[in-house]
Image: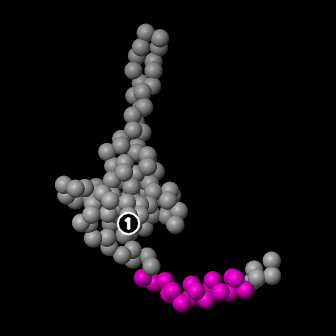
Amino acid sequence: MKRKLKMDDVREGMYITILRGKVEQRVFPTPNGPEIQYKEKDHYNGKVLEVTALDLPYIVVRVHESRGVRSDSLDMRDIEVMAVSPKYIHSLLPDLEIKADPFWDDVQLSEMIDTDECIKEIFKGL
């Protein structure tokens, strides 16, 4: 599974975190002329976020923290996200029960195995 996710890769039921938060800029005067100051909103960086709803470019997440859970919405155009592993989640939140990703419910494992065997056969002589 790739770690850094694009907007279209995110789906309900995934556990993600923020790699880069929204960057805001301010222009302020200085003796040498105007300067631009950049500040990243990083309060969700590294936090465990469970995607509960999508209406792209917006997503609703449950923010899991040691002191509790709350919901928030994020604009995917302003941030970079990545998938997090169960090991990472349990390192931060050992008591969190990770829900199964519903994406795999409709995938038939036997069909995937058959496809793998077919691909092996195609490339066998190369």
Residue 116, image quadrant: bottom right
Q: Position of residue 54 (x, y in %)?
A: 38, 64
Q: Residue shown at 42%/27% (left/top)?
A: 37
Q: Which residues are magenta?
A: 105-121
Question: Is 113 included in the stretch rendered in magenta?
Answer: yes
Q: Residue shown at 45%/21% (left/top)?
A: 35
Drawn side of residue 30 relative to residue 1, left or right: left
Which residue occupies the extreme left position in the image? 67
Q: Residue shown at 37%/70% (left/top)?
A: 13
Q: Nearer the viewer, residue 104 or 8?
A: 104
Does residue 89 sit above or below 100 in this rendering?
Answer: above
Q: Amino acid at mark 1?
A: Pro
Residue 21, image quadrant: top left
Q: Position of residue 41 (x, y in %)?
A: 36, 41
Q: Nearer the viewer, residue 65 or 10?
A: 65
* Quadrant the C terminus occupies: bottom right
Q: Is any part of residue 56 visible from this angle?
A: no
Give the main secondary structure, helix, strand or loop, of the magenta stretch.
helix
Q: Is any part of residue 122 visible from this angle?
A: yes
Badge 1 crowding class, 10 Å Cα cut-off, few under 14, some 14 to 19, many 20 or more, is few
Q: Residue shown at 42%/31% (left/top)?
A: 38
Q: Position of residue 70 (x, y in %)?
A: 22, 57
Q: Which residue is mark 1?
A: 86
